Image (cartoon, rainbow, N blue to C red):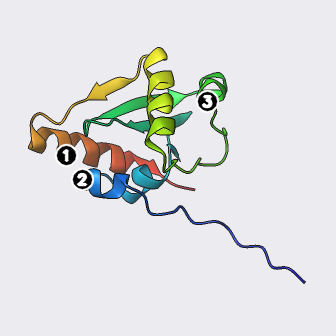
């Protein structure tokens, strides 16, 4: 008798590069919360992030993401860069880490409003 278990996201290179991000954003590309749609986050190579809010089913399909289940973030940097490029095509907000306090304040606001199912 085989027993199935849910796969946990693998620790990856992004956790050390983005210590200010909530664990859910390190391990998953999107989160689902109270608002309609999904919130999608891309991790840029330079330490910034891309954010798309309230993504509908069509946008999630373009980003190659499931509309009901969070997609684990790839360990491969090239795959993450391709994900970020698709996000840019949809007009994602780019947050650069210029002023650390303002950056973390905005991230805390995102972390507070998004909740993983």
* Residue 28 sits above or below residue 57 on the image: below
In which quadrant of the rendered image does the N terminus lie? bottom right
- 79 or 29: nearer the viewer: 79
* Residue 113 sits above or below residue 36 on the image: below
Q: Could you tell me residue 95's position as x and y percent? A: 25, 30
* Residue 115 sits above or below residue 54 on the image: below
Question: Dot 3, how many residues are within 10 Å of its Cα: few (below 14), some (14-19), or many (20+)?
Answer: many
At 80% across and 79% down in the image, what residue appears? 3
At 56% across and 33% down in the image, what residue appears? 37
Q: Quadrant of residue 64?
A: top right
Measured Cα–Cα span from mark 2 to mark 1: 7 Å
Q: Determine the residue located farthest toward the bottom in the rendered image.
A: 1
At 43% across and 47% down in the image, what residue appears? 114
* Residue 73 sits above or below residue 11 on the image: above
Measured Cα–Cα span from mark 3 to mark 2: 25 Å
N-terminal of the two: label 3 or label 2? 2
Is 65 situated left or right of 39 in this image?
Answer: right
Q: Could you tell me residue 70's position as x and y percent? A: 59, 48
Image mark for residue 60: 3
Image mark for residue 35: none
N-terminal of the two: label 1 or label 3? 3
- 38 or 7: nearer the viewer: 7
Mark 1 falls on what kind of element?
Answer: helix
Mark 3 falls on what kind of element?
Answer: helix
- 13 or 66: nearer the viewer: 13
Verify CB contact (< 8 Å) between mark 2 and mark 1: yes
Q: Is residue 52 visible?
A: yes
Is 76 situated left or right of 5 in this image?
Answer: left
Would you name the residue on which mark 1 appears?
104
Label total for image: 3
Would you name the residue on which mark 2 appears?
20
């Amino acid at each position: 008798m085989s027993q199935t278990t849910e796969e946990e996201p693998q620790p990856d290179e992004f956790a050390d590069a983005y210590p200010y991000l909530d664990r859910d954003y390190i391990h998953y590309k999107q989160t689902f919360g109270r608002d309609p749609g999904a919130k999608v986050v891309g991790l840029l190579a330079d330490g910034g992030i891309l954010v798309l809010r309230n993504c509908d089913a069509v946008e999630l399909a373009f980003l190659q993401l499931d509309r009901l289940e969070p997609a684990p973030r790839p360990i491969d940097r090239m795959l993450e860069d391709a994900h970020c490029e698709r996000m840019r095509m949809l007009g994602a907000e780019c947050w650069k880490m210029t002023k650390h306090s303002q950056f973390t304040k905005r991230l805390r606001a995102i972390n507070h409003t998004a909740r993983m199912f």
